[in-house]
Image (spheres, coloured by chain):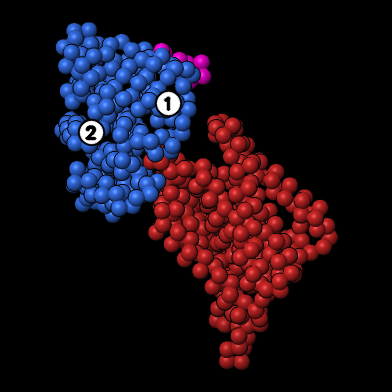
Amino acid sequence: MFNFINTLLIGITAGSIYSLMAIAIVLVWRSTRVVNFAAGGLALASSFVGAAVLETTGSFWVALPLAMIAGALFSAFIEYFFLRPLLKRSGGKGEEIFLPIIATLGLLGIIKAILNYIYGDRVGSLPPPLSDKGFIVSGQSIALSPMRILILGTVLVLMAFLTLIFQRTNLGLSLRASSFAPEISRLAGIRVDLIRTVGWAISGAAGATAGILQTTNGSGSIAPESFEFSLLLVFGFVAAVIGGIESLIGAVVGGLTLGIVLAIILMYVGGSLVFFAAFLILILVLLLRPHGIIGVKGGRRA
Amino acid sequence: MLKIENLSVSHGAIRALHEISFNVEKGQLAAVIGANGAGKTTLLRTLSGLNKASHGLAQWNDHNILHAKPEALVRHGISHVSEGKSVIPELTVSENLELGALWRRNKKEAAKSKQEVVELFPRLGERLSQRADSLSGGERQMLAIGRSIMSKPELLLLDEPSLGLAPLVIEQIFQAIRDLTTAMGLTVLLVEQNAMGALKIADIGIVLNLGSIAATGSATALRDDPAVRAAYLGF
């Protein structure tokens, strides 16, 4: 029982980070109908910014927000200078639908190459700002540490903030309307192009947070060819698809489900099966519930 | 005044509109009628900035409106309700309405517009917090027109508001369009397949045929024109 609760705690923490990455992917999908593989590269680049700020200022609390701002700027830059001209030209017909996807894969490669060029073999350091020693409950150490509480708290605060923006502000209404019906939105006077850039920027900030938390929760250091970030990108995608790719709530449910299932498999079955399990879940969801575990066929959630 | 001169629009190799010219005076309700494929929808989409014109002129109050973006034209009083109940089903009725006024700086006036819409269409007022996909076809059309009014339009472009509605509902929608044109001093370009219904409420009519103008004139004159009757009114 004790073991099981610990497994759950580990799964929820990891899952909440996947949720953030899934949100980054869902936001871009909703605003421009682009599957953004570059999201992983953007998260990596902004985490390097976070590591650099941490090195200079010594404060995680300065590094995290600055990394988020960097992520937002990187992401908006890519949308504005690469995806926007590409989408204008391709028009989304026939095989041209694949162009943006290939483009984001290419961008992922370019971002990694640039980071490789700048950093070479050096690594960025993002150690946990709080103790990652578990609290002691009746003589035993549990898998809940101040650091894990910080991760869960950060994710919760961000989710609450995003929900507030999406459901209660004019910007949120513009973001939702533009993603559901761009033409009607333009006719209603919304500057859909600008709103799309904002959607990418929010996605970049979410991805940056996911990257920083993934590193502090994991090895504490990042390299341009970081395995942790490949995992983050893959699990973020799986979580987004499990959640139905359209919905922010779905991304959270998908991320937590994946985190918990993988933690259970890691604990009770074995580490070698984690990847297998992640893709098995992905394929099962695609076969059995193609609109996601909370998705409704043909319906979209606002 | 809406002034259109020698306007031509092509979709690739296909010529959708060819050298059309007509004027609509301020405060007039103009019905644009014609068969499927006559270029009626293309005309509206070009005037609202969704389609590009190949050449010609279109002016609203002496300002060129060709080559401007739809989101910019809304800010100059031109509002287009596109074909097929142009509402966003995932949003609530209230959100659909507010969408039309997001660009307006004066939030008090925007709130007043919402009040006006609710008075014009009380059925919408009762359903403000429901999702738009729970509405009937007629209510969705009211919502689409309501959203347009939220943008405080001077020139209203309506594309087939009667499409897919029951005869009784069509009559209500047409009556609402007539009332609102008069009450708000709007200029309206009403594109319709339902030629008889549109000509009944319109001041003037424009008949399109294969991208060219076949006839123009006062709505009553067109209703009495034997050629128009035979071709478009079916009797």
Q: Secondary structure at mark 1?
A: strand
Answer left or right for B182 relative to B22: left
Q: Residues within 10 Å of mark 1 (few under 14, many from 20)?
A: few
Look at the numbered discs 1 and 2 and tell me whether their residues touch, using CB distance below 8 Å. no
In the displayed structure, B125 sits above or below B137; it is below
Q: CA distance from mark 1 to mark 2?
A: 22 Å
Residues A70 and B153: in front is B153
Q: Earlier in the sequence, mark 1 or mark 2?
A: 1
On residue B64, the disc is: 1
Q: How many marks?
A: 2
Pointer 2 indicates a residue of which chain? B
Q: Which residue is mark 2?
A: B185
Chain identity for the colour red used in the image: A
Amino acid under disc 2 = Gly
Asked if residue A150 can be seen in this view, the reply is yes
Q: Is residue A280 visible?
A: no
* Residue ID at (20%, 43%): B121
The chain drawn in blue is: B
Q: Nearer the viewer, residue B13 or A231?
A: B13
On what subunit does the disc labeled 1 rest? B
**Residue at coordinates 19% horizontally, 43% vertically from top-left?**
B120
Choose top left, top right, bottom left or bottom right for residue A184: top left
- Residue type at mark 1 is Asn
Residue stretch rendered in magenta on the structure: B11-19
Residue drawn 34% across and 50% down? B106
